Image (cartoon, rainbow, N blue to C red):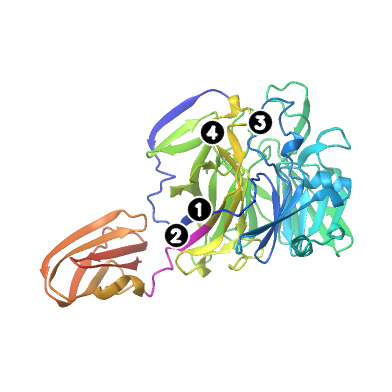
Amino acid sequence: MNNLRLILGFLLLNITVYSQSPFTIALEPFNISELGGLQSFAFGQDQEKWLLVGGRLDGLHQRQPWATFDIAGHNNQLIVVDPISHEKWGAPLSSLPISIQEHLSSTNMNFYQEGAYLYIIGGYGYSTTQGNHITYPYLTAIKVPDVINAIVNGLNFSMYFRQIEDPRFQVTGGQLQKIYDIYYLLGGQIFLGRYNPMNNPTFYQEYTNQIRRFSLQDDGVNIVVQHLSSYTDAENLHRRDYNAAPQILPNGEEGITMFSGVFQPTVNLPFLNSVTVDSSNYSVNNSFLQYYNHYHCATIPLYSSSENEMHTVFFGGIAQYYDSAGILVQDNNVPFVKTIARVTREANGKMTEYKLPIEMPVLLGAGSEFIPNVNQSLYNNGVYKLDEITRDSTLIGYIFGGIISSEANIFWNNDGTQSTANSQIYKVYLTNTIYSGYEGNPQETGSLNLSVNPNPNDGHFVVDYFLKKDSDVKLTMYDMQGATIRNVFLENQSSGNNTYTLNASNQLKSGVYAISIQTTYGKATQKFIFK
């Protein structure tokens, strides 16, 4: 990469945080005893419990061929986590056949869970049978509920694993997704030998430059794969280690969007454009540029059917750009970042990126995964039904794993001590700012009996409140990011029922706002919706 850092002197007009957000995100960390760090792993779920497979126990790979992706960093355990009871169980892979052991201890696998079965394709790691680092040419099927139950109860689980070999599955760093009944193996590469950043002949590397499509029939005993025609594009599909998120497209159909990824064919920099895949083809969107979250990280897809808007949220990771006090900073060393951002696709297909007002607590996110709360409403392809999240602060899932970096740029001096694999879990809470607050929040009205009428309104409304004694009153109107829109000071207001009429139609845009009343003896807050 070029050792270049440019500060672009323009405000973030197209990726600003100041537009009204359809939702807010909050993170709450917690730890589970003896749960170690993990990054670039695969996972499956059964009810609330998780099954964690493969990945690395260390941080960013080192630069020296003899040290990078070493055997000591392999995850040779199957790990079960219960985020509700805060328990963890583990079992070694050693009872499984060697080919399955090796495959399931690899990193950057492509995976997808369909019903009870977790399908894992490819991945990179050291093979004792080959005597070298390889990309594995396997598909391994895991019956997740039975494996979880066996590990928790100390039972044999070897009968719940099956494996087939197929050279078209020899892919690492891609993404495995599904549109209706067809699987899509998107992007990635084959990598053989030891990583070497100086391009000395210790490895063989070839990007697939493809979206590989196939159907899969599984009766619980036999796995039958039928390969379908692939899409090949050496310019736009030449990407790996990126985010491919399931989508609901503007026409209501299922799809996938390939966001960013590395590296462009002619320069060692991330892609900024995106590729959208539907059930019949793919299209490249060069009119949209994604500045944040270029490397694989935890993502959340959410769709509002009432607004016909698709939102994808990205948590930290690695990126060529970051925000510094409202200025877009370009760093071609592609550093670790804290940025949390969303990309929204509107009903007309236009895509826009917004930086959220919160960040990851540290330089964290690359190689992490978002694990959904299975009790929330999802479309068949795993996209959240945003309109059905109507309660404030709803737990929608968890972020686990990933690389924690001590500094933004560690690649050039990385000796293995500058980063680690994250062991902390983050609860992810979402508040739908469009639908929360319709019926008020009685717990916030207090003795002031504060209310806003009508609610929703067009900017003309009345604030009603009750004073148990004479008092000065401060009335504040603000948005959901906390920015004050108007302050009103009312001196020596009489006890009893009071009203104050407001016209704020020329100050508001569609969305959720709040009114706060503060007296000498109490305070209350009420949300309202401006349409």
Tell me the amino acid under the disc marked 3: Pro
Residue at the disc numbered 3: 265
- Residue 452, visible in the rendered structure: no
Identify the residue at horizontal 86%, vertical 37% (top origin). Answer: 128
Q: CA distance from mark 4 to mark 3?
A: 20 Å
Q: CA distance from mark 2 to mark 1?
A: 10 Å
Tell me the amino acid under the disc marked 1: Thr
In this view, the mark in front (2 or 4): 4
Q: CA distance from mark 1 to mark 3?
A: 27 Å
Assess whether mark 2 and mark 3 are in contact (beta carbons under 8 angstroms): no
- Residue 90, visible in the rendered structure: yes
Q: CA distance from mark 4 to mark 1?
A: 24 Å
Residue at the disc numbered 4: 335
Tell me if mark 4 has few (under 14), some (14-19) or many (20+) residues whose alpha carbon lies within 10 angstroms of its own. Answer: many
Front residue (pair 252, 208): 208
Q: Secondary structure at mark 4?
A: loop
Task: Report the span colored magenta.
Answer: 428-439
Assess whether mark 1 and mark 2 are in contact (beta carbons under 8 angstroms): yes
Q: In x, y percent, where is residue 189?
A: 74, 38
Q: Secondary structure at mark 1?
A: strand
Residue at the disc numbered 2: 22
In this view, the mark in front (4 or 1): 4
Q: CA distance from mark 2 to mark 4?
A: 29 Å
Image vertical order of residue 192 relative to residue 33, above or below: above
Residue at the disc numbered 1: 344
Q: In x, y percent, where is residue 394?
A: 50, 65
Quadrant holding the C terminus: bottom left
Label at residue 366: none
